[in-house]
Image: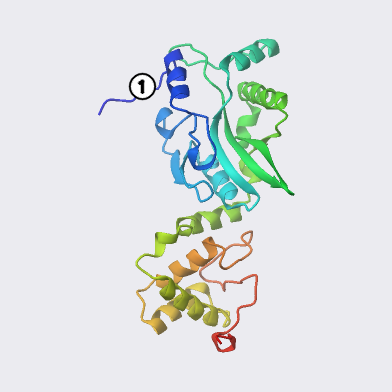
Amino acid sequence: MAKRKRENTSDTVDRRVKEGRGIGRGVDYKPWLLVQDVPSQGLASRVKGVKTGRVHHLLSQLEHRCFLILDWSERVTDIREQYPLLPLEETFALAESLGIKHPRDPKTQNPIVLTSDFLITVKQGDTLAEQVLSIKPSNDLSNSRVLEKLELERQYWEKRKVPWHIVTEQDLPATLVKNLEWLYPYRFSNVLSPLTDSEIYRVRRGLEQELLRCEPLSTTANAVDDRLGLEPGTSLSVTRYLLATRTWRVNLLDPIHLVEPLVLLHHVVPESEVDVS
């Protein structure tokens, strides 16, 4: 297979504009940079978003972790990653006015289109507002060149009166990220196939009965598997699905451990008390 050319030229910019990169919202948005457009160190990823219903192109592990939080947040309504700062002439002129060297392709020496890691839409009361997040490891913020490029980005968005924020690993709650990484594969409706909705409900009710015993989560799930004659691991998968879809709610700032009881944020009603009339 031929190696993909990643050099930036004027033709590259024109082609991406014609492809509709950096345009659209929700499922129709196309990021300026795709995973295959940048050199990979094994940390880039393609992740399907629940909010947008499309595949997101994330260029670092830190971006991926931030994305999980954004996609989970009930305040965030849209996520646009690798958003281009166009027109190129504007950021080039801005760099000149600040006495900063505009980023260039090391091979072609053509100016590179700057991108913001995330342009998000957020609920603010009855209105929607946009915010920009620039994702950087905290140790990068001691690098003067990194700070110069961040200043270019900041001033670009300041002109548009869009709030701009730097986000480092220190801003991402580690326990929340770990929990979301565990739950994320179960946020989609087909993950429990071939279980039917009625079978899932049956497992759920069995789990809700067992949870009242305050046994470790693994013990609870295994007990329901045994009682209902299910394949080992089925009830744990249903548990992850119920949490990932917010059918059950827990405090995700607290660790979820298999060796500890799962504490729901609402009272679980035993099946014998449920009014089915």
Outermost residue toward the front in this view? 277
Residue positioned 52% across, 29% down in the render: 22
Q: Residue furthest bottom?
A: 272
Residue 206 in picture, x, y percent from top left: 48, 80
- Count the numbered circles shown: 1
The answer to whether 269 is drawn above or below residue 150 in the figure is below
Q: Is residue 53 left or right of residue 126?
A: left
Residue marked by disc 1: 5
Position of residue 240 relative to residue 118, above or below, is: below
Q: Residues within 10 Å of mark 1 (few under 14, many from 20)?
A: few
Quadrant (top left/top right/bottom left/bottom right) for the C terminus: bottom right
In front of the other: 114 or 126:
126
Judging depth in this view, the residue of 96 and 275 nearest the camera is: 275
Place residue 86 in its image quadrant: top right
The picture quadrant where one finds residue 189 is: bottom left
- At label 1, the amino acid type is Lys
Relative to 173, 210 lies left or right:
left
From this view, report whether residue 33 is shown above or below residue 9: below
Residue 231: x, y in percent? Answer: 34, 74
Q: How far across and down, in percent of the image, does residue 197 sit?
A: 43, 71
What secondary structure is marked by label 1? loop
Residue 254 falls in image quadrant: bottom right
Estimate the x, y position of residue 224 in percent, counting from the top left: 44, 80
Left or right of 207? Residue 96 is: right
Residue drawn where x is 55% and y is 58% of the image:
179
Q: Quadrant of the N terminus?
A: top left
- Colouring method of the image: rainbow
